[in-house]
Image (cartoon, grey):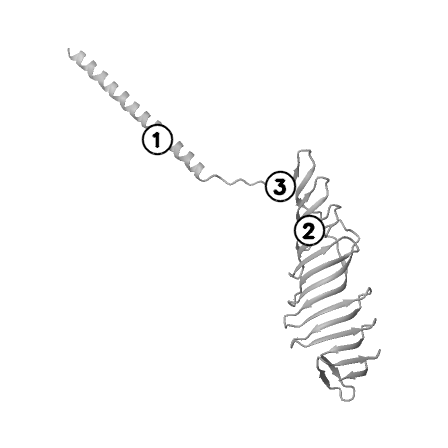
Amino acid sequence: MSQTATSVENLMARLQRLESRNRWSQRAVVGLFLVMAVTSLLGQAAPRPRVVEAREFILRDGEVRERGRIGFQPDGSPAITLRDQTGKERIWVGLTANGSPTLYFTSKNGLMRSVQLAIRDDGTPRFFLTGGLHTPSINLSVEPSGMARVVIVAEETSEPQAPTAQVRVADRAGLAWQPDGSGNLYFRDANGKLRANLVILPDGSPSLRLQDSDEMVRAVFGATSVELPETGTVESRPPSSLMLFDRQGKSIFEAP
């Protein structure tokens, strides 16, 4: 009878141990699921950023034609170009070799500088319009001194289709306004010589100056300053005055 009781007690002890182990296993499994669920939720709430790195991207249309490119130029400066259906480059935006940001819009024939917006080396802005190579163009700019200018130029370049081509311009006419309130409208000949200049002085006085091919002043209508050869002093003339000069700059007529 005592042996039977001992066996029953041993069996009950084993059952209790098994139940305890089962409860621990269940708790461990539930805890593991909770950790996995929390980790998943945290991963969805704060996704890890993805970075794509490359030296060049090329955009192609349904016919595998190149329509856009993001990359570097041979001089190492970055640029973005967009092309039309014929492959002509129509928009170019990037940095030039000297680091100046520039934006170009081009015509259907691919001629560059049809429209140009840029920041020059000295930090001043420039807006340039042209109809093509060797045609009159318009240049709107602000100079480092603060002077605002509208200039008509003749453009020359040996590489009209290069966005970074160096442009040589011949200033033919322009309108400028200085920070001190003075302004002028001027015209140059084919050799770049200043021939006519309509000036507004800082005090508001007007003046028209005509010059010869050597840029010597030959006539002045309006306010001006004249150095008297006899005394070397400088005298001002009113806006109603007229003065004529010879080739050496000597006054030959004055009224009133």
The front one of 47 and 33 is: 47
Q: Please report the residue visible at 19 percent of the width from the left and 15 percent of the height from the top.
A: 6
Q: Nearer the viewer, mark 3 or mark 1?
A: 3
The percent coordinates of residue 121 (x first, y second) are: 67, 59
The front one of 178 and 92 is: 178
The percent coordinates of residue 197 (x first, y second) are: 75, 71
Above or below: residue 173 compared with residue 100: below
Mark drawn on residue 54: 3
Q: Please report the residue visible at 66 percent of the width from the left and 33 percent of the height from the top.
A: 62
The percent coordinates of residue 98 (x first, y second) are: 68, 55
The residue at which mark 2 appears reads as 104
Report the amino acid beneath label 2. Tyr
Q: Nearer the viewer, mark 3 or mark 2?
A: 2
The residue at which mark 1 appears reads as 31
Q: CA distance from mark 3 to mark 2?
A: 24 Å
Q: Are marks 3 and 1 in contact (CB under 8 Å)?
A: no
Q: Where, quadrant-wise, is the C terminus in this rendering?
A: bottom right
Q: Please report the residue visible at 70 percent of the width from the left and 39 percent of the height from the top.
A: 85
Q: Nearer the viewer, mark 1 or mark 2?
A: 2
Report the amino acid beneath label 3. Ala
Residue at the left extreme, as displayed: 1
Report the amino acid beneath label 1. Gly
The front one of 27 and 96 is: 96
Looking at the rendered structure, the secondary structure element under dot 2 is: strand
Looking at the rendered structure, the secondary structure element under dot 1 is: helix
